[in-house]
Image: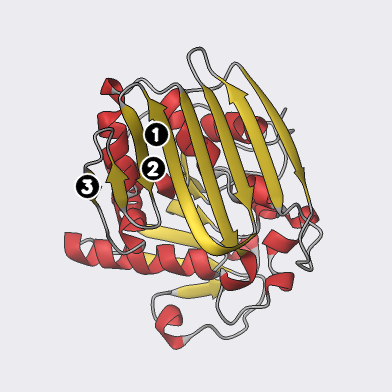
Amino acid sequence: MEVLFVGIGSIGTRHLKNLHEIAEKRGMELHADALRSSLRPLPQETARLLRNQYTTFDQLGHYDAAFITNPTHLHAHTMAELSGRVDCFFIEKPIFEATGYDLEALGLGEYQKAYVAAPMRWCGTFLALKDKMPKLKPYSARVICSSYLPEWRPGVDYRKVYSAHKEMGGGVTIDLIHEWDYMVDLFGTPLECYNFKGTYSDLEIDSDDLSVYIARYPSMLAEIHLDYFGRQYRRSIELFCKNGTVTADFGAGTLTLEDGTVEHYEEPVNERYIREMEYFLDYVQSGTGESVNSPAMALDVLRLTLGE
């Protein structure tokens, strides 16, 4: 299998390692190349997983799959350049930094296989909640994702990463698009939605660090809170139902049911990425039609996230 990585930052490296691990377990021959903005030396453990490192598009051949893991604002240009040279795309979330892109013009039409990253959908706690959803009838949903941006990438100056810069596609509103992605997966698109966002903390960034939504569905209301400044990591959804509250705590790996029973799904964070990669490899090798999170779907969620 011939694979290209465009961008080898923290998330690209994670996907590269997971891809090699799964390929080895499956006995699958794998060759991975990287297209980089410079040939600054990579850590040895990363470099050894790559066959070639390139800096220009004209050096590339044809690939079975390409991982678009460079900064969000470069995604569209990258995919346009690779159009016709890649059989299947893995596009890191969010798909773009804005919604005004023409998927057909970028080569992402109905015949192009592509999947947009949605790792929260592969979290053990979320999978357990989704399995129970048909029997739940929530009146209200309350979602929160609160974390401290300077601690996201140990050893990296948070002021220099894309999250800190609006022009690079940063900002909590789309950086934490996971929350809206899994809400749409669970409940579909709301009838209407209101969003307030801005920069309120003392973090040295020009992107929004707080985004709050109120959304109306046919039979419930939903609140979503996203921030970059919470010192205590919180990521959960509470569903207020007739017989009690169901709480999926993604940080703790627990699911509390209406009767107070607590189910445990604790696991290393990388497990969700492994499940996602397993799905993607199956899709590359034998999948047909749209993926479970196609570019069109991801663009619709982005429009919702940005209040468009």
Say which residue label 3 marks: 263
Q: Residues within 10 Å of mark 1 (few under 14, many from 20)?
A: some
Q: What's the amino acid at mark 2? A: Arg
Count of numbered badges drawn on the protein:
3
In the visual, does 181 lie left or right of 208? left
Name which of mark 1 and mark 2 comes first in the sequence: 2
Front of the two marks 1 and 2: 2
- Secondary structure beneath dot 2 equals helix
Dividing the picture into quadrants, the one containing residue 106 is top right
Say which residue label 1 marks: 292
The Cα–Cα distance between marks 3 and 2, rounded to whole angstroms, is: 18 Å
Residue 164, image x, y percentages: 73, 62
Above or below, 137 relative to 249: above
**Could you say which is closer to the camera, residue 70 or residue 61?**
70
Name which of mark 3 and mark 2 comes first in the sequence: 2
- Residue 76: in sight, yes or no? no
Above or below, 304 relative to 9: above
- Secondary structure beneath dot 1 equals loop
**Could you say which is closer to the camera, residue 2 or residue 121?**
121
Q: What's the amino acid at mark 1? A: Val
Residue 68, image x, y percentages: 55, 54
**Which residue is drawn at the image coordinates 42% and 49% (left, top)?**
119
**Which residue is drawn at the image coordinates 43% and 67% (left, top)?**
14
In the visual, does 94 lie left or right of 21? right
**Could you say which is closer to the camera, residue 209 or residue 38?**
209
Q: Which mark is residue 121?
A: 2
**Which residue is drawn at the image coordinates 75% and 52% (left, top)?**
208
Q: Quadrant of the N terminus?
A: bottom left
